[in-house]
Image (cartoon, rainbow, N blue to C red):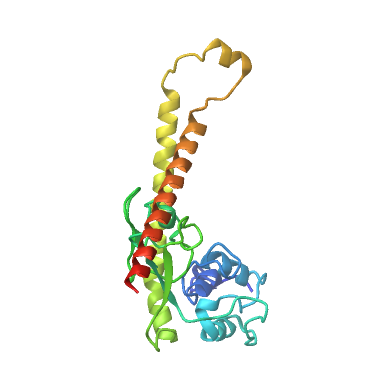
Amino acid sequence: MNGFDVDSDSMPVITLIERIDALLPQTQCGQCGHAGCRPYAEALAEGRDPINRCPPGGEDGIRALAELLEQPVIPFAVDGPQPKPRALAVIQEDSCIGCTLCIQACPVDAIVGAAKLMHTVIAAECTGCELCVAPCPVDCIDLVPVDDPDDGKREQVMARAQQARKRYEQHQARKARDQAEKAQRLAERAAVTTPAPAPAAAASGAPSAAPQTSAVDKNELIRKAMERAAALRATKEAADKDKQ
């Protein structure tokens, strides 16, 4: 197997990896053991992984991969992740502390908000990957099953995949752009002449405390925000008990 199809002029048209990736649901959830759908497609194309490691793709996804790769259809491994109804992330907005960790975790930029401000999930863009749940320090993200009996049908899965792929590619491009801009800012800052370090610091070789202080300050802010969120929940629960 050469890994790609060719046209009449023997020029590559579409790689096997791309054909496999086109059959995956593009949730980028990592349940397959890889960092996203594309790495899993690469592993399948190289014969390193079985075709039954994509729960969001369901049994229809296994059959599609089996047909493409000319392999027998196999069930999901008993000791591995199992397919289940898709669920969308919903943020308990009154408990959100605005830490932005869920925003950073979302692979398709389906969460909007800003630091220290309330976040919310754009339901139409959420893939149900669940990656935003674990980073939340105040456990204010719920997963609500989609109330549509046809949601898991292959046609709908693939329609969502096209949209999710575009969102993911835009997300990746934005991250690359942000990293490039950050690197440029750091390079420009390093190029500026800075005062010589104090003799004591130079002699001891002690690193600057500024980055550590910044990290401590951020952790302290998150800790205080978590305390406020816990206090708000306690007040709400007490009020609910009084009403009963």
Residue drawn at the location 41% of the way across and 21% of the way down: 192
Q: Position of residue 122 (x, y in %)?
A: 32, 66
Q: Is residue 136 above or below residue 83?
A: above
Q: Is residue 12 above or below residue 52?
A: above
Q: Where is residue 29 in the image (x, y as percent from the top left)?
A: 51, 67
Using residue 101 as the reference point, say whether residue 35 is left or right of it: right
Q: Is residue 54 above or below residue 237?
A: below
Q: Is residue 129 above or below residue 155?
A: above
Using residue 208 as the reference point, say whether residue 95 is left or right of it: left
Which corner quadrant of the image does residue 62 belong to?
bottom right
**Camera-side residue of 78 and 173:** 78
Q: Position of residue 59 (x, y in %)?
A: 55, 86
Residue drawn at the location 35% of the way across and 74% of the way down: 244
Residue drawn at the location 58% of the way across and 64% of the way down: 34
Using residue 130 as the reference point, say whether residue 118 is left or right of it: left
Say if residue 176 shows up in the picture: yes
**Camera-side residue of 212 and 170:** 212
Residue drawn at the location 49% of the way across and 38% of the way down: 215
Say if residue 92 shows up in the picture: no
